Image: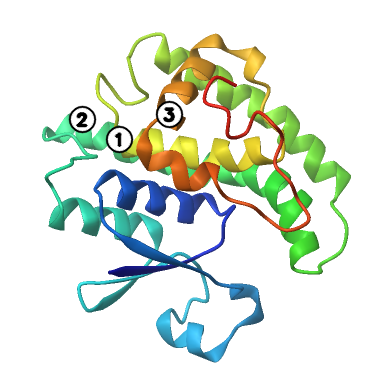
Amino acid sequence: MATLYHVPLSPFCRKVRLSLAEKKIECELIEERYWEQDPDFLRRNPAGKVPVLKIDGMTLSESAAICEYLEETRPDVPLLPKDPVGRFEVRRLVGWFDDKFHREVTSNLVYERVNKKVMKQGYPDSKNVKTGSQKIKYHLDYMTWLLDQRRWLAGDVMTLADFAAAAHLSALDYISDVDWNRSEAVKDWYAKIKSRPAFRGILADQVPGFPPPAHYADLDF
């Protein structure tokens, strides 16, 4: 069985968890308090970050590299298209959410509201929270524009791009920071993706001191 060292609300960990579950790879989850810089964990990943996946006798780090490895070694449930143009678009959107969305939204909302308290780093910065709340509107509008042209974010089939986006939005939804009324298209997309069996583990997450809203695990919102 594989082992994933993770943090429940980390979108990068959630993206890997979704990929593992979609590909039906059994995995033990171990919550890692990476900010404590435990020597054993630093031996697994000197970068001191999660996720870290132990699989096939190896220890893998960096979510993008992990997902690419899973795609190459477990191709029976594909999360990347076969054609180069399609693969480019998926990778572009994964980069969009893991870079731009993460920097402008996730880090300003989830990290301020939750991570600071968990890591005992003080109180949320209201300026950052306000910035995140403003920026998410732009991203939801961009997703709406994509979904007006496609069945899924990157094309006509679900891909890793959808899991990357859902990983971030699900973490934000856990703390009620997504206005699902802003876009019916995005709301319908998220309802489809969170209804997948691969999403069950994500919806079962519980962070001590931060109970999720009632709609979080409700497949019909």
Please say whether residue 11 is visible from this viewpoint. Answer: yes
Q: Residues within 10 Å of mark 1 (few under 14, many from 20)?
A: many
Disc 2 residue type (three-letter): Gly
Q: CA distance from mark 3 to mark 1?
A: 21 Å
Q: Measured from the top left, where is residue 71 in percent x and y?
A: 20, 50
Which one is nearer the viewer's eye here, 77 or 63?
77
What residue is drawn where x is 77% and y is 60%?
Answer: 116
Image quarter where the C terminus lies is: top right
Quadrant that contains the N terminus: bottom left
State which mark lies toward you, 3 or 1: 3
Q: Position of residue 79 (x, y in %)?
A: 24, 39
User: Under tag 2, what secondary structure?
Assistant: helix
Name which residue type carries label 3.
Ser
The numbered mark, 3 or 1, whose residue comes first in the sequence reads: 1
Image mark for residue 209: none
* Circle on res. 90: 1
Give the total number of marks visible in the rendering.
3
Is the residue 39 above or below the residue 140 in the image?
A: below
Q: Which residue is mark 2?
A: 86
Circle 1: residue type: Val
At x 49% / y 83%, what residue is drawn? 41
- Check disc 3 and report the residue beneath it: 195
Q: Quadrant of residue 61?
A: bottom left
Tell whether label 1 touches label 3 (CB within 8 Å). no
Q: Are marks 1 and 2 in contact (CB under 8 Å)?
A: yes
Q: Is residue 5 above or below residue 80?
A: below
Please tell me which residue is depicted at 78% across the width and 56% down the height of the picture: 209
Q: CA distance from mark 3 to mark 2?
A: 24 Å
- Left or right position of 193 against 107: left
